[in-house]
């Protein structure tokens, strides 16, 4: 038996509401507070927003539950309250519907991504993701949601996982959105055509694009989705353009009339669910209602289609292997770890390395803020060593404290300086260092970064699948703790790094050869890539203690 919502959708277009976060912030909520906590602490605010959208003519109202999952709420110290936030969000929407005397309105449970990428690009395991989504979806459905709306996903694998969990728990309709950049791809490089096909195969009841860019960009995405899956119902919920900061406030440029002028084009492109995302208000929804009901039609400029494929330019020149790469294939290698100077004078560092160079060291490991202590940038130190002394370096590259955008930009910067040997690590937590309150988050674990470098940057594209001009040629090392107490866990992490393409390994300091023998025995023989074993000469009895 077909769900009543799907019967209604087949009969004609439905109008969703607009932004929830924009409206809550406009009512004075601090940007550092949990939006979803307002379901518990300021329910009257949330209900008032629902009433505004109902008065504007929305057929579907979304709950204030986008981030009501345990992982997102842990950032606010509220992880255990996430299910209660989800249930309260549905209850408030249902109450607003009843108080408005509009029982025919549908309550859609808003579900966003977890806030951290799933492995291999992130730190969240698949089993954990399934448990967290299951907990959230169960709470939303039990509270009485009429349908589920997944929105603002950039990782198709995560969205498919969430849809799979939902299908295993309930039979309410599912609308699944992804968010697209100006170039018509998601942040991880998925095209509208690919997204539409995969979501159709997953059995969603409708698919589409939300957030993203303004209505013009989303319109082109919807057109491409419709061409790929002409029988799949589509949903369009764009932002009100790109935000600008004026007087300390974020303002969106698209007026309600301009926004509504796209309604006819969205319908012609195949969209049967229409609404708004960031920056849209009840005024935008009211204007869209008028357009859907036959109001005056505005002329909107036609936006040229964005090309689906981006051909990669020919590689200008094959880069030679690094000295370290050749050396590890030919002979026993000795490297020395060095911390950059605390000040800006590099001469003492250079003098020390000259002595090491004369002693026959193959390469210098340049650490990045060891023990979270402030020091010169390791890129500058590595560049000085290579250009002034001609010695090979291995740049320590921690993922901690870097978002994914900065990670990729930093890697391109290193390559442009001819720093091509990398040692990918997590990095020391800031709480043990000079600035314990410094930002300490990360978007990608070391195993995911190894995979990104070897399987994407070294093939000429970034994580989103965009060309970077020519492939990089990084030689990538990863960390291994041969003396780990939990060898099973350590080997599991190591396999992910090796599967990602790690070229060599660098171990924690070893003080007993039996540690190596024990690890090799547990592994089942020698490691498949070169191992640079860490040794820590003791400088004094105090150091030993």
Image (tube, grey):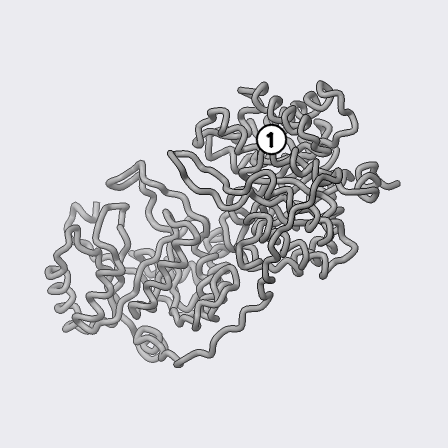
At a point 49% along the width and 34% down the height, the residue shown is 74
Q: Is residue 6 left or right of 58 when viewed as pictured? A: right
Q: Visible in this render: residue 80?
A: no
Residue 32, above or below 265 = above
Instruction: Identify whether 157 is placed above or below 101.
Output: below
Q: Nearer the viewer, residue 34 or 396?
A: 34
| Residue bearing mark 1 | 64
Choose top left, top right, bottom left or bottom right for residue 535: bottom left
Name the spot of residue 90 as percent of width and height, x first. 67, 27
| 65 in relation to 466, above or below | above
Residue 219 in picture, x, y percent from top left: 64, 52
Apparent side of residue 26 relative to residue 413 in the rendered image (left or right): right
Task: Look at the numbered disc 1 and give the secondary structure of its residue.
Answer: loop
Residue visible at 33% across and 63% down? 413
Marker count (numbered):
1
Q: Position of residue 179 (x, y in %)?
A: 58, 49
């Amino acid at each position: 038996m077909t769900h009543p919502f799907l019967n209604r959708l087949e009969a004609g277009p439905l109008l969703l509401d607009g932004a929830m976060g924009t409206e809550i912030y406009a009512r004075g909520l601090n940007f550092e507070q949990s939006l979803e906590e307002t379901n518990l602490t300021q329910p009257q605010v949330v209900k008032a927003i629902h009433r505004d959208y109902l008065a504007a003519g929305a057929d579907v109202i979304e709950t204030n539950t986008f981030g009501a999952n345990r992982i997102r709420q842990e950032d606010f110290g509220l992880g255990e309250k996430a299910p209660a936030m989800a249930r309260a969000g549905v209850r408030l929407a249902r109450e607003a519907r009843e108080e408005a005397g509009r029982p025919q309105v549908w309550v859609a449970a808003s579900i966003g991504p977890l806030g951290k990428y799933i492995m291999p690009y992130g730190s969240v395991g698949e089993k954990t993701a399934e448990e967290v989504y299951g907990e959230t979806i169960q709470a939303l459905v039990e509270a009485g949601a009429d349908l589920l709306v997944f929105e603002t996903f950039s990782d198709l694998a995560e969205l498919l996982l969430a849809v799979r969990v939902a299908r295993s728990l309930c039979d309410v309709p599912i609308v699944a959105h992804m968010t697209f950049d100006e170039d018509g791809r998601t942040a991880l490089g998925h095209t509208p055509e690919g997204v539409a096909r995969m979501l159709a195969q997953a059995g969603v009841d409708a698919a589409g694009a939300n957030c993203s860019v303004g209505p013009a960009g989303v319109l082109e995405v919807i057109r491409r989705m419709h061409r790929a899956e002409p029988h799949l119902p589509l949903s369009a919920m764009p932002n009100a353009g790109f935000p600008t900061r004026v007087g300390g406030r974020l303002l969106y440029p698209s007026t309600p009339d301009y926004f509504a002028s796209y309604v006819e084009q969205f319908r012609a492109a195949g969209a049967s669910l229409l609404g708004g995302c960031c920056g849209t208000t009840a005024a935008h929804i009211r204007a869209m209602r008028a357009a859907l009901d036959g109001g005056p039609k505005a002329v909107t400029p036609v936006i040229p289609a964005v090309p689906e494929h981006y051909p990669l330019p020919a590689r200008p020149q094959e880069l030679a292997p690094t000295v370290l790469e050749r050396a590890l294939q030919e002979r026993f290698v000795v490297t020395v770890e060095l911390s950059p100077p605390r000040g800006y004078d590099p001469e003492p560092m250079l003098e020390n390395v000259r002595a090491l160079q004369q002693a026959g060291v193959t390469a210098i490991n340049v650490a990045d803020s060891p023990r979270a202590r402030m020091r010169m940038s390791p890129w500058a130190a590595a560049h000085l060593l290579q250009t002034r002394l001609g010695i090979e370096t291995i740049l320590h590259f921690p993922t901690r404290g870097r978002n994914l955008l900065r990670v990729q930009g930093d890697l391109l910067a290193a390559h442009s300086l001819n720093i091509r040997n990398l040692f990918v690590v997590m990095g020391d937590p800031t709480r043990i260092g000079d600035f314990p309150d410094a930002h300490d988050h990360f978007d990608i674990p070391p195993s995911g970064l190894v995979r990104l470098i070897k399987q994407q940057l070294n093939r000429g594209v970034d994580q989103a699948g965009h060309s970077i001009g020519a492939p990089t040629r990084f030689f990538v090392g990863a960390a291994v703790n041969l003396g780990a107490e939990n060898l099973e866990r350590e080997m599991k992490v190591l396999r992910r790094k090796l599967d990602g393409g790690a070229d060599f390994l660098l171990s924690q300091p070893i003080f007993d050869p039996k540690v190596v023998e024990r690890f090799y025995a547990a592994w089942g023989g020698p490691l498949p890539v070169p191992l640079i074993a860490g040794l820590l000469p003791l400088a004094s009895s105090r150091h030993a203690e």
